[in-house]
Amino acid sequence: MMDYHLYSITGDRDYNEDYVTADVSESRSCFVVCDGLGGQGKGDQAARLVAESIQRSFREDYVPDGFFEKAVTDAEQELMRQKHLRGLKREMMTTLVSLVIDGNRARCCHAGDSRMYYFTDGVLIRRTMDHSVPQMLANSGEIREKKIRFHPDRNRLLKVLGTDWDGMEAEVSDEMSTGAGTSFLLCTDGFWECVDERIMQKLLRKTKTAGEWVEQMGAYARKHAIAGKMDNASAIGIRIG
């Protein structure tokens, strides 16, 4: 049995450039979180276009092998087509994190610094690695992992959708099992910057539903916003019983 909850708030920004969506059935489900790049303009349009394109591919053309490779490529090609039609260069870019659950297996795809966290029995097993300058510095040992959240270059991304590219920008994960006690969190940087992994696990163990888990993390994020300013913050929590 799967329980899920979608969450998205504007925070202290003028408008919300995040987009979250879920397509859930008894046999398989697709979840998407996108974070449009606000500093470049029209990020909200990019986020919605990409998310809706992936969900359309999931409904109409889903096959287990190679789904993300085709769906994300199609989404990015449509995004670039729209940019060219409008004469845009730096505008209309977005991060992406998406999860497909198909029976007892799951696979994730991401680009940028929107993340997926994978838990078993309340314990964090792994997360996606950001395509960002601070993540690169952490991977090389120049900074500690926990410093990513507060690094001055945390918004410098190395991969996003909506740039000229030679191939698919997004990274596809290996398969993950989805037995009882499995949980997933997909979220934007405005969410995970304010909620560290210790709190994620603590609240996961404390709560009984995906809604309680995500809403309590959201309340924590609002209370602990960096410099008192809340960014757009979005998440999807999924719990499998």
Image (cartoon, rainbow, N blue to C red):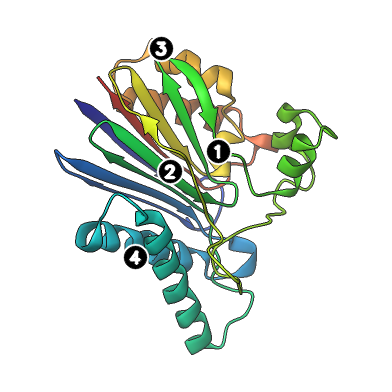
Local crowd at mark 4 within 10 Å, few (<14), some, or many (≥20)? some
Which residue appears at 33% of the width and 31% of the height? 238
x, y percent for residue 21: 32, 50
As displayed, is residue 234 above or below residue 85?
above
Which residue appears at 58% of the width and 43% of the height? 189
Q: Which residue is mark 2?
A: 108
Please report whichever mark, 1 or 3, sits nearer to the chain's N-terminal start.
Answer: 1
Which residue appears at 33% of the width and 23% of the height? 212
Local crowd at mark 3 within 10 Å, few (<14), some, or many (≥20)? few
**Marks 4 and 2, Cα distance to the nearest angstrom?**
16 Å
Q: Which residue is mark 1?
A: 128
- Nearest to viewer (mark 3 / mark 2): 2
**Marks 1 and 2, Cα distance to the nearest angstrom?**
9 Å
Please report whichever mark, 3 or 2, sits nearer to the chain's N-terminal start.
Answer: 2
Quadrant housing the N terminus: top left
Please report whichever mark, 4 or 1, sits nearer to the chain's N-terminal start.
Answer: 4
- Nearest to viewer (mark 4 / mark 3): 4
Q: Are marks 4 and 3 in contact (CB under 8 Å)?
A: no
Disc 1 residue type (three-letter): Thr
Which residue appears at 54% of the width and 46% of the height? 114
For the view shown, which residue lies furthest in the front direction?
A: 65
x, y percent for residue 26: 14, 38
Disc 3 residue type (three-letter): Arg
Disc 4 residue type (three-letter): Ser
Please report whichever mark, 4 or 2, sits nearer to the chain's N-terminal start.
Answer: 4
Residue 205: mark in rendering: 3
Q: Which residue is mark 4?
A: 53
Local crowd at mark 1 within 10 Å, few (<14), some, or many (≥20)? many
Q: Are marks 1 and 2 in contact (CB under 8 Å)?
A: yes
In the foreground, 167 or 185: 167
**Marks 3 and 2, Cα distance to the nearest angstrom?**
23 Å
Residue 115: mark in rendering: none
